[in-house]
Amino acid sequence: MFGKRAHSGLIVLITFLLLVGCGEYEKILKSKDYVLKYETALKYYNEQDFVRASTLFDQVVNIYRGTLKADTVKYYQAMSYYGQQDYILAGHYFNELSTTYNNSVFLEESEFMVAYCYYKLSPRPSLDQEATFNAINALKMYISKYPGSERVEQCRELIVELNDKIVEKSYNSARLYYDLGYYKAAIMSLRNSLETYPDTKYREEILYLILKSSYLLADNSVESKRMERFQSTVDEYLSFTSEFPESEYTRDADRMYRNSQDILELYTTNN
């Protein structure tokens, strides 16, 4: 019985404190005391109450513009949105800080955070990679501007990770034509991917898919184009096996090569 009463009392106390806290916050929101708003925003920020912090920083950021605290308010405004994982607004405010306050003590960190927010916005490889390209460009600019920074190694690691994503996107886009049976388009797209990213980890598979697309294109061609396209298949086979003589795809590649050779010999014999 006593336990139930104590539990009920604790709930009432917590509810009361929350209501008091909300009431104080509402008063501060309506207040014209901007120093109090700024100090309270910092308090909420340090308590990781980023929603309330950002709301108050939004209210005072223009008030402090042109003062010695202007960049500090802008920095914490950006960090409050970053704490909410709102990387679009956080990146926007970090960018405002870096372009407006060139002498700020937060300048270097803000320029890194602009790049890092782009990094956090970079989607999975199957989606549009605009944010990924933006992140790579921003990270490279940061390295160029701050070559001695302790963040340079992290930037390089992030660039490698982002480049891998773009390479995978390029490979998947090219592979899609093959999966759909558009072999002529597949050959062109796969070659473009290989030309753009010659050191891709998908190089072996791409060369194999070019070979197989060439073979399937030839096999499904009209009579007048079969000989030319089977010859292209033989050429692709020689390119593939010269670079990957012990590939996991060798057995299937050999099969396509033998079939292509047999068809070419038959054409030669009949003509």
Image (tube, helix red, strand yellow):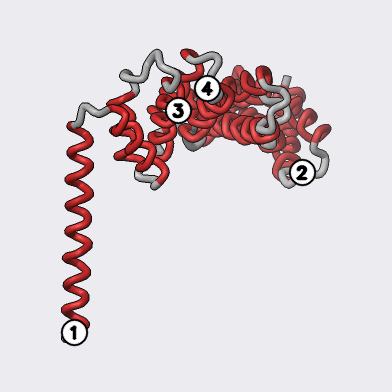
Residue 166, position as x, y percentages in the image:
57, 29
Which amino acid type is marked by label 2? Ser
Q: What separation in Å lies between label 3 and label 2 (alpha carbons)?
A: 54 Å
Whichever of callouts 2 and 4 sits on the residue coming sooner in the sequence is 4
Identify the disc placed on residue 14: none
User: Is residue 137 visible in the rendered structure shown here?
Assistant: yes
Whichever of callouts 1 and 3 sits on the residue coming sooner in the sequence is 1
User: Which type of secondary structure does the marked residue at label 2 adopt?
Assistant: loop
Q: Which of the two residues, 12 or 195, is positioned nearer the viewer here?
A: 12
Q: What separation in Å lies between label 1 and label 3 (alpha carbons)?
A: 50 Å
Task: Give residue 170's quadrant in the image.
Answer: top right
Dot 4 and dot 3 residues touching (CB under 8 Å):
no
The residue that label 3 is drawn on is 75
The residue that label 4 is drawn on is 134
Q: What separation in Å lies between label 2 and label 4 (alpha carbons)?
A: 36 Å
Comparing marks 3 and 2, which lies closer to the viewer? 3
Whichever of callouts 4 and 1 sits on the residue coming sooner in the sequence is 1
Q: What separation in Å lies between label 4 and label 3 (alpha carbons)?
A: 21 Å
The residue that label 1 is drawn on is 2
Whichever of callouts 3 and 2 sits on the residue coming sooner in the sequence is 3
Q: What separation in Å lies between label 1 and label 2 (alpha carbons)?
A: 75 Å
Image: 65 above or below 76: above
Q: Which of the two residues, 261 or 26, is positioned nearer the viewer here?
A: 26
The residue that label 2 is drawn on is 247
User: Is residue 222 visible in the rendered structure shown here?
Assistant: no
Question: Which part of the image, by quadrant, shows the C terminus?
Answer: top right
Q: Left or right? Give the position of 194 relative to 13.
A: right
Task: Give residue 235's quadrant in the image.
Answer: top right
Q: What separation in Å lies between label 4 and label 1 (alpha carbons)?
A: 62 Å
Whichever of callouts 1 and 2 sits on the residue coming sooner in the sequence is 1
Dot 1 and dot 2 residues touching (CB under 8 Å):
no
Residue 30, position as x, y percentages in the image:
17, 32
